[in-house]
Image (cartoon, grey):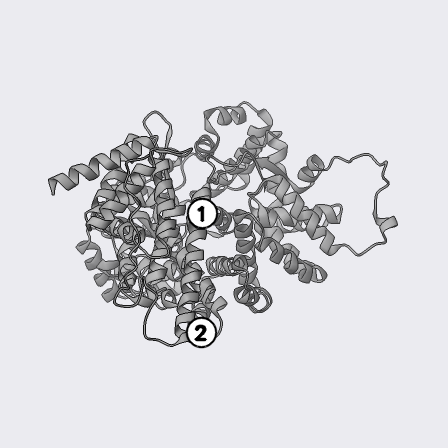
Amino acid sequence: MSDSPAEPQQPAKSTPDGEGGGGGTGGEKDRERAEGAKAKHQELGRRFSARTGQAGSVGERLGAEADALSSFTGNDIKAGAMAGRDIHFHAASAGKDSVRLCELTDLDALGRVFVPPQGFTALVEAVASHRVTVLCADDGAGRYMTARRLLSGFPRVFLLAPETRLGMLTAADLTAGAGYVLTDLAGPAARALTSFELESLVGVLEECDARLVITVTRGRRFGCSEFSALVHEQGPAGDRREMLIRHLEQRSGFEGADRVLDDAEAMALIAEQLEKDVRPVHAATLADLFAEALEGDEPLAAAVRARIELQDQAAFERWADALPDLSTQCMAMAIAVLGGEPYETASASADLLQSYLEPENALESAEQARHAPLVRKRAARLEALRAHVVPSTVQTRHGGTAAGVVRFKDPNLQRRYLFYFWNEYDDARPKLLSWLREYARHELDTVRVRTAVAVGFLTARSFDHVRRHVIVQWARDEDPRLRDAAAVALRGAAEQDPELRKTIRGMVREWAVDEVSPALQATAARAWRLEHDASGSAAALEALEDLSASDEEEVTAAVCETVTEMWEVEGERLDAAALLLGWLGKKDQRNTARLAFLYAAADLVRELPKLDGEITTWPLLLHIATVAPIRQRGIAALWADSLNAAGLHRSAKEVLAEWAHTAEPEPVVRRALARLLAVAAARDGRTWDVIAYEARSWAEGARGAPKCSAEVLRILTAERQFR
């Protein structure tokens, strides 16, 4: 027999608000409702704790969303389209009119590809001498890259969103000692600037010890002479062939660049193209095209020439119209929607779309003869579609990336063919919407997300039609997968057309207060990125406040998923623990707080490289508690509460055991878990007993964690003796 004490029994005594014993003075209906809510929460707890078997799914889903958004938005970004495509703006602070910005993190890579224009030294001196510098150059001359390079000596550099009103910037919006870039200032905004606004702007920048570089097209007029005095012309471009080679080395390495340099036809095409178009942006575009040809192991000159020709709209339409059959057209649409997924997934989706679109035929005329040989389709399809199978760039929760995914060789084709199919094939549009609905509830998270992003970009093109026939129907659906898809689609629409943001946010806010439709409220909770991107994480959390008190299962689950996603995105920056602890103090929000913590603890992981190149896996919340001590006490308090929570403590213990299993191989993770649990155990004697009992149970079993068990018990015993 084991000498371990029996598991501490859960308290039967009711708390002052009735939790635990289930008694009370309410009527029979109140008791039935309370019992029903308790059963729902227990079932959610079991579902959430089971997510330990698929930990990392939230990160995988968000990674697919970022990849899909980048595929559609990257080439819409006028400034820096060739120098960093993943530009997604977020609010700088929680204020209502907070500026939106994006931190630029690829400045080292920029240094390797940047070729200074003539007179660059004078521009460096101008930035050093003035808080505000206006950089003027022709479109395509690389003024955005020059602006970023001018600020490369700053510890942090941010890109301001295009709609930024310079006169409204405050110190609360800026980071001390940082550099800022505002690209392509529009004519009306430039002419509206006043001397007072410039004086205010300079004062704010001085207060934060920051610098701002504004880029404008040549000939832009300003409303006041003081701004005009800050304008500096960018000199003629440097060696454009050198630019191309540096970009190519960055994308394809030195070996790839050597292959291009050694190919006479490729170099002749480069000389021809650089003579036709002298803009630096064209040199960078050519480098990307050659890099894509290298990745596909294609004949360099022929492949790049074909891509250049396809960039012409008339040539694109000729290509699209010449696709040989419905099967190939459907595969093109499948790649437009699901580009970034395995070829097999896209092919299956194309077959389903074809079945929706082709007329019904009698079986004898539609079916192939049984003795007919199999026909090779993949190679011919990919060639006709100018697509290829390439290594994935999206992390999966199973470690590493998918072996190979299908994409168009020219990334522009993904967006262009999606819109072409939607605009030109009127008869196919209703069936297309049915097909999109089918894939918005696919079994794979990443497929659902990519489908939703594509729907979002169609929403931006045909807002009223898609909102009425797709978005609202999905938002009202009982299937949570469709509600999630509606939320992702709305974010995609806002990314594509910023003018829709206000309309979309207003619609989502109406859903949030629609108590008649819990499904709409759940969708509103899942659409948190709209509020986050506009006003910051604090505003997004605040928007969940009333929804967290709902006793509807779908709303509670949606709030829990949203808190988990926010924790994944924001990491240690997000004080979600304080929010959940606040909810614990309110009876109608308490179970939501516990379930949200349980969901995040079960799903979120962070993989970090060690010095030897191996990967260490951490439970994300444990890593946050370790690297951000200010967060440790809150996360420990949430563990202490969950392990004692009536109805949920078993689920919490299952998640904690999975943390122990994850920590078992790594001494540093074991020590971190032991320290965190020691803080939780210090709450009271009962919590100490519960954690000690659970730690002893980890020493045995198929998924035992004996080293972690010993470490936790050692720290607990030492802490108790010390106290």
User: Picture coordinates of residue 35 (x, y %)?
Assistant: 41, 66
The number of callouts visible is: 2
Q: Which mark is residue 206?
A: none
Q: Residue at x 11, y 43 (%)?
A: 723
Tell which circle, 2 or 1, labels the residue nearer the N-terminal end: 1
Q: Is residue 417 left or right of residue 674?
A: right
Disc 2: CA contacts within 10 A as few (<14), some (14-19) or many (>=20): few
Q: Residue at x 51, y 61 (%)?
A: 483
From this viewpoint, is residue 160 visible?
no
Q: Amino acid at mark 2?
A: Glu
Q: Is residue 89 above or below residue 192?
A: above
Q: CA distance from mark 2 to mark 1?
A: 30 Å
Quadrant location, the N terminus: top left
Residue farthest toward the bottom in the current orientation of the protein: 27
Q: Is residue 615 above or below residue 78?
A: above
Q: Which mark is residue 515?
A: 2
In this orientation, which residue lies closer to the viewer: 467 or 142?
467
In this orientation, which residue lies closer to the viewer: 95 or 222?
95
Residue farthest toward the left in the current orientation of the protein: 722
Residue farthest toward the front in the current orientation of the protein: 1
- Read off the residue under disc 1: 50
Dividing the picture into quarters, in which one does residue 419 lie? bottom right
Q: Residue at x 30, y 30 (%)?
A: 707
User: Picture coordinates of residue 559 (x, y %)?
Assistant: 40, 60
Dividing the picture into quarters, in which one does residue 106 lie? top left
Nearest to the eye among marks 2 and 1: give it.
1
Q: Amino acid at mark 1?
A: Ala
From this viewpoint, is residue 297 visible?
yes
User: Picture coordinates of residue 398 (x, y %)?
Assistant: 47, 37
Q: Is residue 264 left or right of residue 496?
A: right
